[in-house]
Image (spheres, coloured by chain):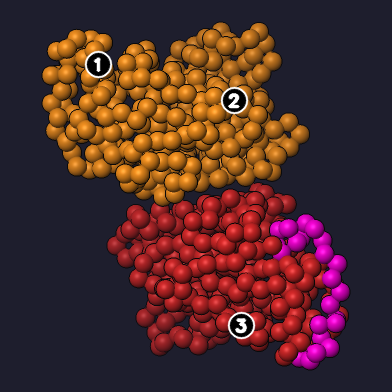
Chain colours: A orange, B red
Amino acid sequence: MTRYLVTGAAGFVGRNLVDALLERLTPGDELTLLDREVGARHPRVRAVEGDLSEEAVLEAVLAERPGVVFHLASVPGALAEREYALGRRVNVDATLDLFGGLADRTRPPTVVYASSVAVYGTLGAAPVDARTPLQPQLSYGTHKRMMELALEDFSRRGELRGVALRLPGIVARPGLASGFGSAFMSDVIRSLAAGEPYICPVSPGATAWWMSASRAAGNLLHAASLATPGTLTLPALHLSVGQVVAALGGLFGADRPALVTYRPDEGTEAVFGRSPPLHTPEAEALGFRHDGTAAGLVQAALRAH
Amino acid sequence: MTRYLVTGAAGFVGRNLVDALLERLTPGDELTLLDREVGARHPRVRAVEGDLSEEAVLEAVLAERPGVVFHLASVPGALAEREYALGRRVNVDATLDLFGGLADRTRPPTVVYASSVAVYGTLGAAPVDARTPLQPQLSYGTHKRMMELALEDFSRRGELRGVALRLPGIVARPGLASGFGSAFMSDVIRSLAAGEPYICPVSPGATAWWMSASRAAGNLLHAASLATPGTLTLPALHLSVGQVVAALGGLFGADRPALVTYRPDEGTEAVFGRSPPLHTPEAEALGFRHDGTAAGLVQAALRAH
């Protein structure tokens, strides 16, 4: 019997993770979902609504002594950059409070933490691997790196079994204009699949690291079963927007690529459209996977909700 | 006219920094010293007594809008490892509160932060340089690395001009049994200079990175004048205990080395006695310096108070 806790359960990755978790629950397992509003209810699920930075909310989830925690709650990058105090409160203070509250040397809980490739900062053309320096260029990425370090420290102290996974761009978020700088990654998939025109803020040659929400959920679940704590960059497909658009054409019709109008914005392209190749043999050896092909990515991405 | 603030002003590095600062004050400069107890008073100095993690204390030092801050206050390594909550409160929370309170995009203050070589964690035999991975093995070192990242982020945001300096072992702390695992570095110097016997918890071949408190003060002051923010490992003398003992013999008499009885403790030696060579061309190019020679180190170390 395992008590699970998912923070940020109503977010994009959270919703898809909860679906995957519900499919795997065995009798006696319990699942607590935390978010400001937890939407759909389920008989096996307890909902806690509020912000992890409220003391009563933190106490409510800690009181259940969860054995496996997926900590996804986070203020996203653009907002955390603009509202520093809010970003610090959730992405640093509340996260440290959660880790510290869970810490237990007798029965260390497993904590799977959703970190981000934002820890790398601006990358050159050279492929990224385990030796690539981490030089975050946003407060969001800085705070993610700080929390990776904190989680590694709790694991070293024997108080948590922490696995930090650096997530790439996760697709396809439903609805448009989600406020993420990387929103184009989801929007181009949703628009073309629906046969709607799309104005793309990066060029067709813009490259990014892509993963479907269901694959991200699979990787997060896999992380909870790892024997060894640590911090890992997940494998991801390294694809250009043009490659993804071509895959959409292959799946939905040769007329679809013409629905895209490219109006590259230099700032967006510089931050989100120049990802170099990514080498993650460590994570692959441990069983983490990407979506396989551009077509596989698109199909899985469209099942996300 | 500059308003200076020194946190941890009554600590070992703090006291010696304040001495150096007082020698350099020009008319109109103001100096505020913060510590739980600030000892010696001086007409040019304002003392604030308390803990930076108390809101009123933080407000008192921020109200003066210091232009140059030396942030030395910290819970030391062994204590922070044992009392995690205390370490987090001072070494993380209060430090972030200080940085955030000082942040000012219009007139970014200079913040010189005393980081530590503890950010490296366990090192192998290979020389340490700018590419050496940072894998702290204590909560203290983890929190120092987290604060380096946070300070770099405030500099990137244009809200502080932050310089984090990684200090090596600073000598020679007055009195014995200071509670630091690296206490032997000071104790061997103090004991032999005084002609007293010393039981050394590491072998004569144990190597460490050494710097006198006055040299540390000189480097901290130099950091405040740097044009470019950043994080730097300071140059330090890479010496064995045997080399330092030999220098003490040269300065105080050939009978002094025989005062040492070596009773190596494997744990202490593993953590504090196996430092590999250290290459810091970046810091040296910027004008940071070590003590030059073992004899120079010992002489400067003995002037520390």
In contact (CB < 8 Å): disc 2 and disc 3: no
Q: Amino acid at mark 3?
A: Thr
Q: The C terminus of chain B is located in which quarter?
A: bottom right
A283 to the left or right of A81: right
Task: Read off the residue under disc 3.
Answer: B293
Quarter of the view holding residue A260 = top left
Tell me what residue is drawn at x 20 percent, y 30 percent: A204
Above or below residue A98? Residue B87 is: below
Mark 2 → mark 3, Cα distance in angstroms: 52 Å
Above or below residue B17? Residue B146 is: above
Task: Read off the residue under disc 2.
Answer: A224
Nearer-N-terminus badge (1/2): 2
Tell me what residue is drawn at x 54 percent, y 24 percent: A287
Q: Where residue A40 sits in the image (x, y, percent)?
A: 45, 12
Q: Which residues are magenta?
A: B252-273
Q: Where residue A218 sits in the image (x, y, percent)?
A: 50, 19
Q: Amino acid at mark 2?
A: Ala
Task: Read off the residue under disc 1.
Answer: A248
Q: B58 or B129: which is nearer to us? A: B129
Q: Residues within 10 Å of mark 3 (few under 14, many from 20)?
A: some
